[in-house]
Image: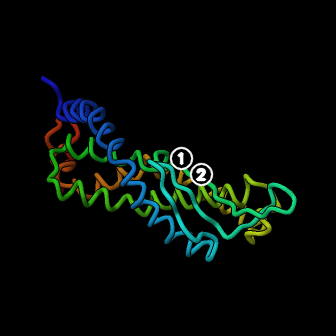
């Protein structure tokens, strides 16, 4: 007989492929919503840097106030791009965990909403990393990004691109499905807590 955690893990793995398909289909619209949260973060971290965000599929173009001369005598506006798929794939993980836990639809929507500020963080820090680090010291100077801010941006970028996309879906699932997790632990022999006293 399969143990309860193993059965849950198998269900979660089986839900992963359809969850990723759904996420990929919804990615362009999801990118627009995550971009709105990125603009909030950018307004706090680098006010006045971004004037608009344009979307092509799941790719976001950040129209900045930064100017450069690609050819002598011709001025252009810097428009860095960020791929939203890198920061939003956690939605697929969340859906798979929620479906494996047989969560109600409103919990899935609540979990997706909980992920948005963190996905926006990743997108915002992607742009700041490009401007403050990747595009050279002249662009960073024009953006007003000093040495200590470059270090903070590098740390925030790592957090937003490596840790948060996979950690936050699990955290959201654990918060919204706590009764399921407690039942899972209690039903598994050897994992139940000893009675008090």
Side of 155 where 59 appears, left or right: left
Which structural element holds mark 2?
helix
Side of 82 where 15 appears, left or right: left
Which residue is situated farthest in the top direction here? Answer: 1
Q: Residue at x 73, y 52 (%)?
A: 134
- Residue 169 position, x and y percent, is 36, 50
| Residue count near mark 1 (Cα–Cα under 10 Å), binned few <14, some 14–19, many ≥20 | some
Which structural element holds mark 1?
helix
Image marks 1 and 2: residues in contact by CB distance under 8 Å? yes
The residue lying toward the viewer, choosing from 138 and 189, is 138
Circle 2 is placed at which residue position? 158
Answer above or below: position of 4 versus 31. above
Answer above or below: position of 89 versus 53. above
Q: Quadrant of residue 76?
A: bottom right
Circle 1 is placed at which residue position? 162
Q: Residue at x 60, y 69 (%)?
A: 50
Side of 42 where 143 appears, left or right: right
Q: Which mark is residue 34?
A: none
Q: Quadrant of residue 24?
A: top left
The residue lying toward the viewer, choosing from 48 and 181, is 48
């Amino acid at each position: 007989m399969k143990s309860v955690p193993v059965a849950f893990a198998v269900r979660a793995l089986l839900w992963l492929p359809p969850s990723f398909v759904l996420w990929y289909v919804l990615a362009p619209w999801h990118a627009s919503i995550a971009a709105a949260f990125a603009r909030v973060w950018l307004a706090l971290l680098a006010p006045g840097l971004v004037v608009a965000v344009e979307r092509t599929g799941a790719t976001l173009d950040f129209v900045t106030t930064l100017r450069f001369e690609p050819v002598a005598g011709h001025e252009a506006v810097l428009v860095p791009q960020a791929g939203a798929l890198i920061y939003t794939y956690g939605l697929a993980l969340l859906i798979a965990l929620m479906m494996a836990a047989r969560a109600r639809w409103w919990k899935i929507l609540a979990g997706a909403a909980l992920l948005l500020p963190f996905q926006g963080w990743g997108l915002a820090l992607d742009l700041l990393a490009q401007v403050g680090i990747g595009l050279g010291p002249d662009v960073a100077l024009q953006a007003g990004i000093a040495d200590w801010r470059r270090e903070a941006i590098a740390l925030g970028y790592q957090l937003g691109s490596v840790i948060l996309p996979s950690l936050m879906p699990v955290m959201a699932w654990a918060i919204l499905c706590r009764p399921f997790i407690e039942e899972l632990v209690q039903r598994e022999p050897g994992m139940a807590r000893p009675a008090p006293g």
